[in-house]
Image: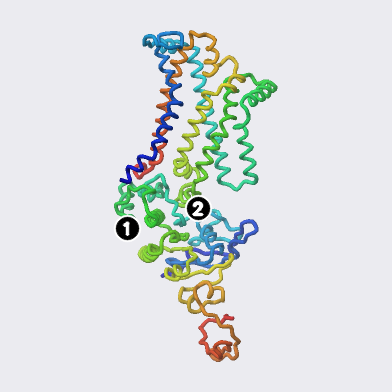
Amino acid sequence: MSNIRIWKKPDGFLIYAILYLTFIYLPVLFLPLFSFNNSTYITFPLKDFTLKWYDKMIHSPSMLEALLNSIKVGLLVAIFSTILGMLAARAVTRYRLRGRGPLVSFIMIPLVIPEIILAISLLILISQANIPLSLWTIGFSHLLLCIPFSMLILISRMEGFDKSLEEAALDLGENAWITFWRVTFPIVLPGIVASLLLTFTISFDEFVLAFFLSSTDATLPIYIWSSLRFPTKIPAVLALGSSIFVISFFVVSFAEWVRRRGIKLETTSGI
Amino acid sequence: MSQEAIISFQDVSKSFGDVQAVDGANFEIKQGEFFSLLGPSGCGKTTLLRMVAGFEMPNSGEVFIDGQPMSATPPNHRPVNMVFQNYAIFPHMDVRGNIAFGMRKSGLSKIDLNRRIDEILELIKLQGYGKRGAEELSGGQRQRVALARALIKQPKVLLLDEPLGALDKKLREQMQIELRQLQQQLGITFLFVTHDQEEALTLSDRIAVMSEGHVMEIASPSQLYESPGSRFVADFIGSMNFFEGEVIDVEKNQLIVSTQSLGEVILDLPDTDCSQE
């Protein structure tokens, strides 16, 4: 009897949840829909089913180069941002720092500065210093943008970290370095994975900074933006978008699998 | 019990900023003893323990373990192991993983190590729990795992930082008995930190009563209970009646004291010098 009552309650929430999910995912689902549509124009009614846009995508070297550029920048940014964020998070959570509050807020400022302001100031700085614009300048600006996100994620993960676990590892005969790899790292791994994923995503679809700080090497968002001027290129962009959508689904699932496995990683069989 | 000192504090002092946590600790713990540091919170007992483990360094003085000065030895190279107050069980490993943690460099083959783990699981009465994760253990079981993880290293001294504080009363009493049995069975020196007078009196061979960074008195439980050396110790150890009085006469080994509430009282003097008020 009481079970029925429990089931009746969330009905209102269920409708809300369905509406919410529809609102989020319906627009995204147009992407694959039109990518299989045999027409240059993105309108209803749909024409025949086709794979030619995917074929076009594979045979568009400039698009693939932009994709590769974005992945390169994204990976480097994710790795460095996570390492630096980790060091900062450790310092903030582990030691009693003087002026910790103001320091953390200061580092978080890029989160609230409008990106276009950041982009213009960086452009001025970089051109004053006579540094040529390249993927490196984009990567640097993305790093600046991503470190606060890494820090936020890792601080929240490390704040709950029990310091006596590290002391226990030392006490049981491991040095600081091995202690990090056997205790600290596996426990904060979910935070590291989350930081890597989030910062990669931020860099991957960041447009404003990349637009201001790029030269001839375009990242994917810039390529997409520039191809809007040529309507014939758009369906191939949709095909690419759909592919990225599917791939990121698998990447996130994989990351989640790694995270769960990380928790159960070390048993006696590993020694 | 041999009378050799396994741990020796020589004028050990430690301060944190303005707070003097330990002030001139100067005593020895003997081989095979169950030794307790007893005192109210903030008296410096945990700091003293952490200096033995190597997590804190004395500002002055020296801690010796088995005759060796320890100031240049990091925690991972000291022949002592610790049971932490919150047990510090590694959450990402199962019970066997936790127990085997410190044995990576033991040089034991996998078969021998597994046998050792089985033995120690039996010792702490957790047979069949080897594959349990840390999250699936009760407080008492966590404590046993923490004990096993330290004991498998065969330390010269086992350090216990209020290990029973988080358990309920019944379990605590049971664990007291088991701890004492374990200590006698293994013959390992136990250095035990507690703020619970009853616990210290039940378990220990000797107790150091501490207050505000000072060691007030070191004695056996019966000595502390029956003839405490100072008013503070008497007051801290248990419910005592205090009678203020004036010494009127000293005979061979008797004191004649005049008190307001009891009149004249004849006290037998202990063998040691009398330092009572």
As helix, strand or loop, the secondary structure at mark 2 comes to helix
Residue B247's place in the image compared with B42, above or below, is below
Q: Amino acid at mark 2?
A: Pro
Question: Disc 2 or 1, which lies upstream in sequence?
Answer: 2
- At x 51%, y 17%, the residue is A66
Q: Quadrant of residue A55?
A: top left
**Image quarter (top left, top right, bottom left or bottom right) of the N terminus of chain A:** top left
Q: Quadrant of residue B138?
A: bottom left
Task: Tell me where residue B242 appears, x and y as whole percent.
Answer: 55, 80
- Would you call the spot at circle 2 few (<14 residues within 10 Å), some (14-19), or many (20 or more)? many
- At x 56%, y 16%, the residue is A217
- Pick the residue in front: A14 or B106: A14
Residue on which the image places disc 1 = B125
Report in which chain the residue with disc 2 lies: B
- Pick the residue in front: A25 or A151: A25
Color scheme of the displayed model: rainbow
